[in-house]
Image (tube, rainbow, N blue to C red):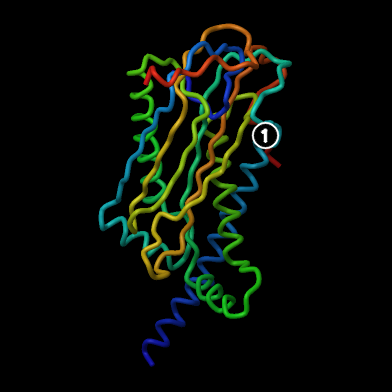
Amino acid sequence: MLQLYFGLALLLLGLTVGTLLERLHYRSIRKREHAFITLPTTSLKHAPDTEQVVRTELAIGSVVISVDYFKRFAASMKKMFGGEIRSYSSLLDRARRESMLRMKEACADCDLIINVRVETSTISNGGDSSIGSVEVMTYATALWYGNRSQHSHPVDLEE
Amino acid sequence: MIITNTETVPGKRLTEHYGLVQGSTIRAKHLGRDLMAGMKNLVGGELKGYTELLQESRDEALRRMVKQAEELGANAVVNVRFSTSSVAAGAAEILCYGTAVRLEEGAESSTPPPLPKHEEY
């Protein structure tokens, strides 16, 4: 009986704190994405040859995010019936967007980002489902133009 | 040392290929960090300890790759790719590989320089 209460308490904790943390994270993601809204980012291999490039650098961003107890429980329930596991899609979405942002923050004053690649893996798949965490790494090539008149990043767009 | 994940570098000319260079590392955090991550797992969110772990191993892998390129006499590594895998719980393996080349000032050429001949290896 005690075990059941303990399990329920953990679920409740996961549901409340986890949802709160996720909401806060999404707010931060949206705010920071807004700041980089004018920085062109593509997965193309070549930059357009209209501008003279003076500097080239590898930019990397990475993050490890785990899912909360309640969501893990919900996912295991959902697995019985099949279909999209929504609790995990938000986890992956947050991780990808966060790592993309960190990559951009690593080269915040560049003019163009090309050849974006996203790599996903799990650090700890220790047999059982003890840790449902995802690790995302985003890397790209950041370019700086010789003529810097028209660009300045990041744009600070406070509402 | 210029490192990019594109095949060419804008504004530079590729004059020589030195072949593949790579660096890899496997790292783990101490037990305390793993316990903290386990706790954090209840409420979800970023596992900072593991993010750090990933960053450290990535930097180390890059450093090893660059060292190899320097030994070959290259001044840039192009077409860099990362690959991660997990060999054990709580440990991260990162492999990064690329092509060591020599770059010189000049227009970016569309035709790549000749690759090293087989006998030269």
Where disc 1 sits, the SS reads loop
Residue B54, how many percent across, how many down? 40, 45
Residue B7, how many percent across, how many down? 57, 25
Crowding around mark 1 (Cα neighbors within 10 Å: few <14, some 14 to 19, many 20+) is some
Pick the front one: A64 or B19 = B19
Extreme-left residue of the structure: B31
Q: Quadrant of the N terminus of chain B?
A: top left
Q: Quadrant of the C terminus of chain B?
A: top left
Q: Amino acid at mark 1?
A: Thr
Q: What residue sits 37% from the left and 29% below the top?
A: B65
Residue B109, how many percent across, how many down? 63, 13
Pick the front one: A155 or B26 = B26
Q: Is residue A92 above or below residue B7?
A: below
Chain ID, mark 1: A
Pick the front one: B11 or A41 = B11
Compared across the picture, whether A50 is left or right of A10 comes to: right
Q: Is residue B102 above or below residue B41?
A: above
Q: Quadrant of residue A107?
A: top right
Q: Is residue A52 above or below residue A27?
A: above
In the picture of the structure, the residue carrying the numbered disc 1 is A42
Q: What residue sits 51% from the left and 73% below the top?
A: A70
Compared across the picture, whether B8 is left or right of B96 comes to: right
Compared across the picture, whether A103 is left or right of B57 comes to: right
Compared across the picture, whether B30 is left or right of A27 comes to: left
Q: What residue sits 46% from the left and 43% below the top?
A: B83
Q: Is residue B61 above or below residue A87?
A: above
Residue A124, how many percent across, how many down? 39, 58
Extreme-bottom residue of the structure: A1
